[in-house]
Image (spheres, rainbow, N blue to C red):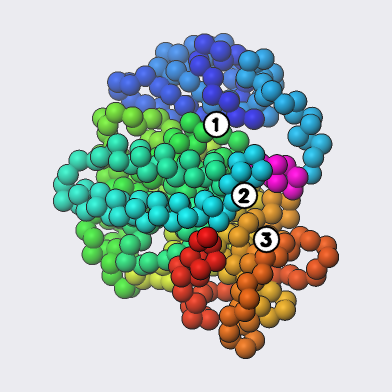
Amino acid sequence: MLITLPISEITPGMYVDSVAKQHEGIDSIKIKTSGLVRSRSIIDRLVAEGVLELIIDFEKGDAAIPVKYRPKVEPKVVESKKAKEVEEADNLQSGVTVKQEFAKASVNYDQHNRKLQALYGDLTSGLTLNLNMLDEIVTEIVASVFRNPNAMTILTRIKDKHSYNWRHMINCAIFTAVFAKYLGYEESLVQEFAMGALLHDLGHAKLPQGIFSKPTPVTKNELTVIKKHVSQSLGLVKGVKGITPLMLDMIINHHERLDGSGYPRAIKAENLSRPARIMAIVDVYDAMTADRHHQDGDEPINALRYLLANKQMFDAELVQHFIKCLGVHPVGTIVKLTNERLALVLEGNKSNPIKPKVKLFYNAKHNHHVTPKDIDLSDNTQDLKILASVKPLDYKINLSRLLKEHLLE
């Protein structure tokens, strides 16, 4: 369980996940890695460095959760339920279905993209960062995710290579918000995570734009230029009120890798915090699945396989959580079933990621649409299974139109 505590309430035995708040004006903000508070001297050092609040992971530490922070419902009641029952209870509590949330989310998603496109252009032209506008976008994303995380996630499947830069910003914010919520972070911290994700690649706007619009892969020299976007991003947010240490951590370290093969500092696992590791996973996942000028996006399952296969670079435990969070076939993915039908994944299954809830809509054998039908693949009364994920264009399917036809009430 992740809880934000003021520095005055930190005690030896607690496990620090990351810094949540630090005094403004500290000349040199040192992003701390996670770890156990072994002595009072460590706490004194944190106080001296201006740390005000810390995110504590009580599942890893030796200390008990302070009484005032304990949940009202006894943990044993939740733990005795099956994962699926817990998930259904959460959905009932929110009271918002995918269809209900999708109508609002689709309008907001389009508006967010237009605003980010304008902001990206302003930054390219030399104007300063409008953090208030970004804060409004993040607030709406997080609110949507807490009502129903599937609606916004489905929209990340819509591709457009001509708007990759700002779509990548918003998609990463969505994925990060969904993942942080899944990991148990408080809503205020999910907001910080989402803002860090929205800002992480902002420096691309300060680089030669021809690099991003060319139809061929980047050269070694162009890659050297692209790597400068980290320092450019820091330059854009430096001194801006509202930028937190957690956000800076995500910006600085999202291209670092556990084995030291990343950039810009080639630091290793012991110096990489949990937020930085989360951002690295989300950044690579969205970049691999997005359409860009020089490449077509890969299917989600292949991106997840890549993350799994590279344990030396990405936090294996977090990757496993990420897969359980999104599902092997994430919402918005089109899959082919064993009955030669295509279906749209609408809702994941936390207890069995390969058996989500889907909407059957297309006969792949005879290439024509069929009467839509909702199917829960985890239902034991039917034996349908997913054969593979498919690209919409392989069957001349317009995904944006398909989503509106089946999700807009």
Q: Badge 3: how crowded within 10 Å, few (<14), some, or many (20+)?
A: many
In the rendered image of this protein, does residue 222 appear above or below residue 195?
A: below
At numbered mark 2, what does the secondary structure look like: helix, strand or loop?
helix
Q: Badge 1: how crowded within 10 Å, few (<14), some, or many (20+)?
A: some
Residue position for label 2: 325
Q: Badge 2: how crowded within 10 Å, few (<14), some, or many (20+)?
A: many
Q: In percent of the image, x 34 and y 53: which residue is there?
A: 111
Quadrant (top left, top right, bottom left, bottom right) of the N terminus: top right
Residue type highlighted by circle 1: Glu
In the rendered image, residue 83, in percent from the top left (x then y), is placed at 75, 45
Residue type highlighted by circle 2: Cys
At numbered mark 3, what does the secondary structure look like: helix, strand or loop?
strand
Residue position for label 3: 357
Specify which label sits upstream in the sequence, 2 or 1. 1
* Mark 2 vs mark 1, CA separation in Å: 17 Å
Q: Residue furthest front?
A: 409
Residue position for label 1: 186
Residue type highlighted by circle 3: Lys
Q: Is residue 319 visible in the rendered structure shown here?
A: no
In the rendered image, residue 317, in percent from the top left (x then y), is placed at 64, 45
Q: Is residue 394 left or right of residue 88?
A: left
Specify which label sits upstream in the sequence, 3 or 2. 2
Q: In percent of the image, x 59 and y 51: which residue is there?
A: 97
* Mark 1 vs mark 3, CA separation in Å: 27 Å
Q: Quadrant of residue 132?
A: top left
| Camera-side residue of 308 and 115 | 115
At numbered mark 1, what does the secondary structure look like: helix, strand or loop?
loop
Q: What range of the chain is rendered magenta?
A: 84-90
Q: Quadrant of residue 384?
A: bottom right
Q: Residue 86: within the magenta?
A: yes
